[in-house]
Image (cartoon, coloured by chain):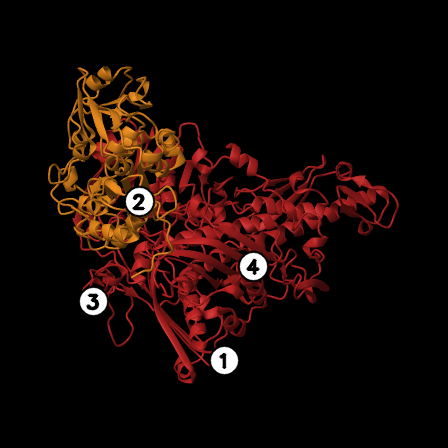
Chain colours: A orange, B red
Amino acid sequence: MNRFEWSAPTTVAEAASSATTTMADAMAGAADAALVKAGGVDVLDLMKENLVAPRRLVNLKGITGLDGVDADRDGGIRIGAMARLATLAEHPLLRGVYAALGAAAAQAGSPQLRNLATIGGNILQRPHCWYFRSPNFACRRKGGIHCFALAGENQYHAIFDNDLCAIVHPSSLATALVALDASVELTDAQGRIRRLALESFFLAPEKDVTRENDLRSGEILTTICLPALPETARSVYVKQGEKAAFDWPLADIAVRLDLAPNGSCEGAAIVLGAAAPVPYRVRAAEALLVGGVITTAKAIAASQTAMAEVRPLAKNAYKLPIFAALLRRAIMSAASIVSAPIALD
Amino acid sequence: MASSSTRGEKFPFGIVDATLGSVERDIPADEPPSLPVNAALAVIGHRVPRLDARAKVTGAAHFTVDIKLPGMLFARVLRSPHAHARVLAVDVAAAVRHPGVKAIHLVTERGGKELQTVRFVGAPIAAVAATTRSAADEAAALIKVDYQVLPFVTDIDEARQPYAPPVLEFAAEQPPGGARPANVWGPSKGPFASVGRGDVARGFAEAEVTVEGEFRTQVQTHCCLEPHAVVADWGADRLTVYISTQNLIGVRDELADNFGLERDKVRVVSEFTGGGFGSKNEAGDYGAIAVELSRKAGAPVALIYDRREEQIAAGNRPGTWQRLRIGARRDGTLTALSVLAHGTAGTETNAGVGNIAQGLYACANFAITEYDVMTNAGPGCAMRAPGNVQGAFALEQTIDALAERLGLDPIALRDRIDPNPARREERRIGAARSGWPARHAPGAESGPLKRGLGMAQSFWPGIVDTSGACEVRIARDGAVEIRSGVQDIGTGTRTILAQVVAEELGLNAEDILVRIGDTDFPPGLGSGGSKMTGSITPAARDAAYKAVRALCGVVGAKCGIAAEALIVKAGRIFAPTSNASGLAFRDAAALLDDEIRVVSGRPADYDGFRVTREGGGMAKSDLGGVQFAAVAVDSETGIVRVERVVAVHDCGRPINPMQVENQVHGGILMGISYALLENRIMDRGSGEMLNADLEYYKLVGAADIPEIDVVLLENYHGRSSTDACGIAEPATVATAAAIANAVYNAIGVRLRSLPMNPATVLAGLGRIPGWEWRS
């Protein structure tokens, strides 16, 4: 690991003028990189692996007021980017309609990591593809010309939109946040705030294969905003790792249903994580759920429809049945359908 | 033990609460008297908390990674980025100019020649010692190596093909009459290979039922908590080496021989060792590198592997492909058993499947052919029950398949073909505790979550090493000290030595100071083969017994009592025949003119060894062990959860049941991890291990651990003065096989490859779209 300068600003403006490089630019070789450090989980990993060698780290921990979780005037929730996963996992506001986010935070990493990791860092962490994380592979995401996973070891890789680069998006909180229609606020040194929907903040490889999001240099991710949602809405998050804890998901899924008092579904969001280079929203499957009461048959149909565009690689087709089963279970759980065991095909 | 005279002595024999009786043995006249069963003892057989537990959990215990010496330098090894390459030139000029660098060493091959070819990603090429860790890292990066890159192969199936690039320039000796692919070596002979018997062709002809199957096991890496670590200090008078090792004396001899030093000019120390499962048996290239750097720099040098080095260069359990065939009569009698195995230990040999197929069941006709397949991958080495874990996965599934074909319960079949009385009792106990009678037919549950129960057996020989010794000292202030050059790698050797000596001296284990982990003490032996407890405790008891007799001699002479009339018990020395209360142990010791010091060794087993090798032998019993696993398989996601394990084991006389249970727990966790998760993943394009970490190299965590029910038999053999045996390896042999049999019972599909992760399970269930045409 290289030597670096430590900067400890106390305001966002100071931090934004001090941390002038995004991690993606730094890893692409930007000189004299000055990087933001939030919880430090990912930046430390990347530095120890010699994947990035910043000149300066700008610690956000000294800035007060960046870690709040508060109800806003419009009935939504504002979450400071420095809020820790352990805080979110137990936060009373993240229940009911927002339960998917609390559950995603509770199942990420390990207790030690959740005590350090922040929601902002979780969203902005770089992918965990083993080719990307090894300094010995100059892959497309690091400015090279190959995706080594496509013809290599791809058992943990993307099953959708994997033509250029087969990473899966690393943030499991993002799976829940996209299902909750979250947006992000990006603040620059002049205090200007750029606000955009999280879904459009994330970049597919076709747009820019070297970065996962639209964070620009000189911007600090300061706030994650959850919109007001109908009282009758509910959300669930399910994750399946190989291990029961402290493992990346093979598949994770967030489902949000807006259910009228009569049980009729008036709106739905379905997002698949660990499936594609970005959190993968499947609107065709959502449409099948809207209108009328959700039934087991509809849940099965939606889970099959969600898989329509699937493009498995040589070693990850096993993820298809996992996603299909998990999605059906998540929909039924969100709709509170308790049924006899499903007869298998 | 040199005494030629013998005496007859009666020993407990058999299993307590089952078959316990006694046996008369002729033993050397100066051996201690026979011990009764554990229930009649004061310290042995009791659940004594480990003496070093507090030091370990408070951080007071110093491991090799904690050693700090004045002027100590830090080493970094430069490793090959290529899976196969000729090293044309190594330019260290820039590294030499680095201000922190004190020594540079080019790694040499055996025989002192400079390294000419590297054969796996991670092979060491050069090393630097520098004043700080970061200076060492920087300097290593300044070394320029000129490589001629050569073709390579990392996959066992590809390596077996005739067109595969040869891993070694020289091919193995070929059998007469035909060439084999260059990377296929064998059939294995040597000390670890199994031996055939009878005529399998005739045996299969006599069979009324034949079952067969092909099995695959993955490469499992060593993941010791403490990495491989060494601090070498080449001093003016002698070489001192602190090293995280399983084998202090072996490291001493290896380094003395390799560096041309007298053995007493090398001192090797490991007061605490943070785990060892076979990869810490030797000084290895890391030990040699640290010593060489220290010699050149004239300062102590610390070399501590990082986790990536642990994964790629510190050894592993070889992967295997096996084909088993078993023939039997309708009553279950085995008529023939044949094994064909290909294993890969990377650039090493000894990738066989152990002796479990040879030894577990009665079968007159047995044949085994094992080949080592060379691959450009990190070298394999011994790993907790080498071969037998892989062998058990195949054998115990095939035995279960045979039982099903015969319409027999798997336990009933084993009752017919397993001659070991301990395992018979273990099956009976395990069946009762696991709910075996209520076990359903394979795949009988209709819901998506399918539960199953399976069992499998362990096989491991009782190995004894007679080269170790133990000293007992009784000081005039009553302090008792044990000295032995053995090491405690976490198994509890320190504590059992104290228990054995305390029993003999009428004291508590906590009263004894145990000094081990240093080759300056009487010679120890390696912690490998599950032989430590059975080998060193008789030496400790013998020394303690003789020390007590010496103490009684002095006390008797000074008090006018015949020494033979005196005994020590409960902290006092007295004559049971008299009413006098005798002396407190400390007061008795005060009568000594000189400290008592007795050094004893380990004699041969009382009725001789079954097999004798240099430095030791193999006991006449095999260590038993039967494990039952209850699993839940989510047939939609392919996730297997182990819900409960019942493990019934025997290890002769258990010296400390709590520590034995602790070993069994560890063996089961390692077995579950191997069965479900662990897998070295190699990139075929580069030869790189892609999961050289603990992030994608997945180990069981707390949330994956089932309820574990350990039942420990006391199984007396009357073979030594403690009659103890080891447990570490038998504890892990059966686990993966039991889980596989349980998975079959759950889903009705037999999984023949490891790990049984969602990809394997869903493929087995035929649930992966397109999987059939892809395979």
Say yes or no: labels 4 and 3 on the same chain. yes
Which residue carries the number 4 mark? B433
State left or right for residue B558 relative to residue B492. right
Q: Residues within 10 Å of mark 2 (few under 14, many from 20)?
A: many
Whole-number angstrom distance, CA of label 4 to CA of label 1: 27 Å
- The chain carrying label 2 is A
Of pointers 4 and 1, the one earlier in the residue sequence = 1
Q: Which residue is mark 3?
A: B162
Instruction: Name the mark nearer the viewer: 2 or 1.
Output: 2
Q: Chain of mark 1?
A: B
Query: Marks 3 and 1, how far apart in space?
Result: 44 Å
Residue at x 35% of width, y 35% of height: A96
Which of the pair B77/A196 is nearer the observer? Answer: A196
Q: Secondary structure at mark 3?
A: loop
Q: Is residue A53 visible?
A: no
Mark 3 crowdedness (10 Å alpha carbons): few <14, some 14-19, many ≥20: some
Label 4 CA crowd tier, 10 Å (few <14, some 14–19, many 20+):
some
Looking at the image, do the residues carrying marks 4 and 1 touch, with CB atoms under 8 Å apart?
no
Q: What amino acid type is highlighted by mark number 1?
A: Asp
Identified by mark 3, the residue type is: Pro
